Amino acid sequence: MLNKEIIAGLKNHRTPFYYYDMDLLRRILDIVRTESKERNYKVHYAVKANFNPVIMKTISGYGFGADCVSGNEVAHSAENGFAPDDIVFAGVGKSDEEIELALNTGISCFNCESVPELLVINDIAGRTGRKAPVALRINPNVEAHTLKHITTGTEENKFGIRLNELGEIAELIPTLKNISFKGLHFHIGSQITETGPYRNLCTRVNEVWEWFSERGYENLNVNVGGGLGINYEEPDTMPPFREYFEIFASHLDSRIRGEISFELGRSLTAMCGTLISRVLYIKEGVSEKFVILDAGFTDLLRPALYQAYHKIENLTSEGERGKYTVAGPICESTDTFGRFVDLPLTQRGDLIGIRSAGAYGESMASRYNLRNLPGAVFSDSL
Ligand code: LLP
């Protein structure tokens, strides 16, 4: 929550910037640590959600692992307090250079997405005199019921190994001398707010685990990915962490003896971040009144890319309410954060807060139009 004191502290900073409520982040990390430990689950933080070093160090300080999707994320995680053997590396397109870097870092697992990748990892591991720990990312063919652009676990999708390829893989694995087969990895999508997809995922995990178990692999680890959604409409409502872990506790096969792990990104960092920007101009359209901000989609891409909703608040006005279309300065019409947004009287110079932006906000920023990258301000140092 942004109270008057915090807002006063933010007024003198150069906009746009991300404001991070570090107490809130720590509160969330506390809950997730308690809830996951209670069930003996491991949580890897999905670094792609936010790789700001201050955020990363806070998360690694809680003992979470890191889920990475590039060589740079692997190196950055190691530099920001994550133990190498707590780092996993996923991604459909790992380059040779990235594979070598991850091997040299000594990561705990490659989440391998295809047969050709398995062969390349085996080759590079052999060449560098190492044995590569590998989990197979299985495409579970489970519908996630989320935004079309961020679903990943259905069959017609570039991610993971298809279920009908398992026979071929099971025959191949024993022939790969430089690979140590550690576990199974699944991920069905992101911003999932229903429980049904997770129950379906558990069913599929159990089937695949049993299939491997019958072939002599009884001790495989199981990584069920991430995806727990947040409430963008009500930015102060906590995600249902307890219920989330409970679904897995009650639906995963109790014979699974290996480590059970999760890869949470959004649900850990989204709530603590607010994009703060300043109103540059108020512009009268034909039927809309435009608020032009100094923040655009280069600072927060989600609304332009996915038509995603973020709650928008005027932090400095209590005037009469009206409807405004809130847009950025970039020369593209998708550079709009919300249409007909209910706001108090909004004028040049007002501070606007775009909520729930701590995940996939700063990490997706770009320099299009040669704009500056957004800054970052932390509550601890206000
Ligand atoms: N594990 C894997 C293999 C993933 O692909 C992802 C997200 C996660 C874990 C973390 O998922 P989370 O807990 O954050 O839902 N840019 C999009 C989201 C893309 C998510 C990609 N993968 C957005 O702004 O909504």
Image (spheres, grey):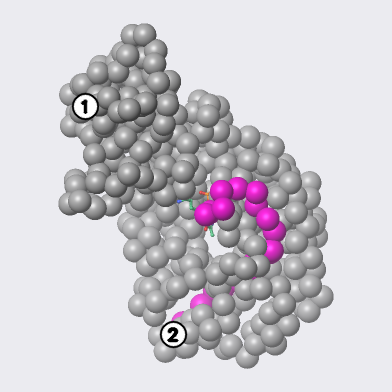
Amino acid at the residue labelled 1 = Tyr
Q: Is residue 161 above or below residue 267?
A: below
- Disc nearer the start of the sequence (1/2): 2
Q: Which residues are magenta?
A: 130-150
- Name the residue carrying label 2: 124
Q: Residue at position x 60%, y 48% from top?
A: 146
Please tell me in which quadrant of the rendered image residue 310 appears. top left
Please check the rendered image and state whether residue 146 is part of the magenta-colored stretch, yes or no: yes
Look at the image and tell me in which quarter the N terminus lies: top left
Please check the rendered image and state whether residue 312 is part of the magenta-colored stretch, yes or no: no
Asked if residue 378 shows in the view, the reply is no
What secondary structure is found at the residue carrying circle 2?
Answer: helix
Count of numbered marks? 2
- Name the residue carrying label 1: 281
Q: Is residue 79 left or right of residue 183?
A: left
Disc assigned to residue 157: none
Look at the image and tell me in which quarter the C terminus lies: top left
